[in-house]
């Protein structure tokens, strides 16, 4: 074992941890936004779409959080440096974000973005090198 080999192993572990922290934080943030979306029919929760590189531009016919959360997990890549996007194109989603629902008077996105550092810290603790 050489010092160079030790450095290579450490670099590989660090890179893997960074990728896992990035992916875990993204999924945690998206799940929190989806779950904080107010429920009437479930359509608003169901219309959250996770994509890489380009945001979704359409509305979809699905209700409830489970499919949106599953999609967030499936579509969030392993690896830092890729733009993973969460979009909801329902015409009333901005109204919900601005607090028109008593279920989510602080909105969904702003509230969770404010907790972003905590989500990162939680993932960093889980993926210590």
Image (spheres, grey):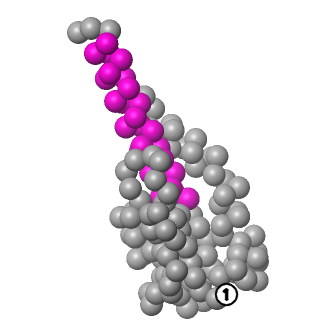
Q: Considering the whole magenta stretch, tell me its main secondary structure.
A: helix
Q: Residue 3, located in which quarter of the rendered image? A: top left
Image mark count: 1
Residue at 51% in and 87% down: 59
Q: Residue at x 41, y 59 (%)?
A: 76
- Which residue is depicted at the point 70% across and 80% down? 94
Q: Where is the C terminus found, in terms of image quarters?
A: top left
The residue furthest left is 1
Residue 16 occupies quadrant: top left
Is 116 rendered above or below residue 125? below
Q: Which residue is mark 1?
A: 92
**In the figure, is residue 122 to the left or right of 10?**
right
Residue 103 visible in the current orientation: yes
**x and y, in percent, of residue 53 in the image:** 47, 63
Residue 52, placed above or below residue 68: above
* 88 drawn magenta: no
Q: Is residue 18 magenta?
A: yes
Q: Is residue 42 visible?
A: no
Q: Residue 104: horizontal and vertical position, in percent?
A: 70, 75
Would you identify the image quadrant in which residue 44 lies? Answer: bottom right
The quadrant in which the N terminus is found is top left
Residue 107, percent from left and from top: 71, 72
Instruction: Give above or below for 101 relative to 106.
Output: below
Q: Name the residue rendered at 63%, 46% in the picture.
A: 118
| Residue 1 located left or right of residue 74 | left
Q: Is residue 68 above or below residue 13?
A: below
Residue range highlighted in magenta:
4-29
- Work out which residue is located at the far front of the displayed protein and give it: 54
Q: Secondary structure at mark 1?
A: loop
């Amino acid at each position: 074992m050489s010092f160079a080999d030790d450095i290579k192993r450490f670099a590989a572990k660090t890179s893997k941890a960074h990728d896992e922290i990035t992916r875990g934080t993204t999924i945690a943030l998206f799940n929190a936004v989806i779950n904080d979306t107010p429920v009437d029919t479930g359509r608003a929760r169901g219309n959250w779409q996770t994509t890489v590189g380009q945001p979704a531009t359409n509305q979809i016919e699905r209700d409830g959080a489970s499919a949106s959360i599953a999609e967030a997990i499936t579509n969030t890549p392993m690896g830092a440096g890729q733009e993973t996007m969460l979009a909801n194109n329902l015409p009333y989603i901005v109204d919900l974000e601005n607090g028109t629902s008593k279920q989510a008077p602080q909105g969904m996105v702003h509230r969770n973005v404010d907790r972003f550092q905590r989500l990162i810290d939680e993932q960093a603790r889980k993926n210590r090198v």
